[in-house]
Image (spheres, rainbow, N blue to C red):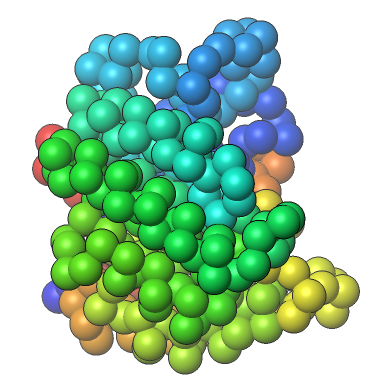
Amino acid sequence: MPAVGVGFHTDAFNSSHKSFRQALEWAQEHDVRFIEPGVIDGACWIHGLGYFPHVSLIEDPVLLRKTMDGYGVEFSQIDAAYPLSGRDGLTVGVPYVQKAIAWASLAGSPRVATTDGLHKPEGLEDREALDLMKRAYTEIIRVAEAHRVIVTIEVHGYFTTRPDWLAEMLDFCGDTPWLRLNLDTGNTFIAGNDPVEFTKRFSDRIDHVHIKDVSESLATAVRGGSTGIAISHVAAGGGVNADNIREILRLLHARNFDGVLSIECEGRGGPMLADSLRWLRTELAEIGFTERVPASR
């Protein structure tokens, strides 16, 4: 029986201004073993005062890992998704991602998430932007291979929500195990794709999954005209994308997927995230998945 990790993105606590430590406490309380925070390269007052549920690359990664061990929680990945498709993808995005990779290797995070921008890059033709991203990922994967950290490309923007371009991006660095796909069930849907067909096409490249539903009102307003949702304002299972998510879980089960399913939703301080967690765990049990325990336990 396939075993899958279950976790959540700490974006769930953005609006409630909780700290990363409080996100760990929530995970421990709800027996969630994996967590996915964003990372910042520096410090700011909102982070220092505990109003921000993500982590800074200034923090010592080994000490943070020891803190997380105390809660029984591991990273599924860290989110360093600065858009790599624009002119500053090489000058800002690449050093940021490379630093995140080195930090992740010490913090015990097996993956670092990356992505493109939401819109067509200003001042660049599509081919120019793709060529820039290929240069960017070549430099990023060189570092990822050295640190043995997987880099995932999240489906989130102008290029990644178009299957043919995404396929090209996943092949930027040839046949490497260090560049994989972070499937986002909500972003594929809101961009106008069929999430199930999208999953079938890229099934063998998927290493991490964002479980994200979409409200009926949002789908009516922007589906096909947007590429990504910053955060879903409906619990998983409560939106118009629920049936697609169920079928995607069946497809993942059939290929013995053993990565992590990371819930992305507005937590409202926790209750909406708890509803999502209950729904996902019920679906996983019905499909035949077991929930994986981190190796450190």
Residue 57 at least partly seen: yes
Task: Reply above or below: 14 against 134.
Answer: above
Residue 274 at least partly seen: no
> Percent position (x, y) of residue 270?
61, 41
Quadrant of the rendered image containing residue 194:
bottom right
207 and 176: which is toward the camera:
176
Quarter in which the N terminus is drawn? bottom left
Rendered residue at 66%/34% (across/down): 14
> Percent position (x, y) of residue 232?
68, 58
> Percent position (x, y) of residue 190?
68, 74
9 and 181: which is toward the camera:
181
> Percent position (x, y) of residue 184?
50, 66
Quadrant of the rendered image containing residue 123:
bottom right
236 and 197: which is toward the camera:
197
Task: Reply above or below: 11 against 176.
Answer: above
Rendered residue at 16%/46% (across/down): 145
Rendered residue at 61%/24% (across/down): 52
Task: Reply above or below: 295 against 212.
Answer: above
Rendered residue at 49%/22% (across/down): 41
> Would residue 21 be found to the left or right of residue 230 on screen?
left
> How many dots with numbers?
0
Quarter in which the C terminus is drawn? top left
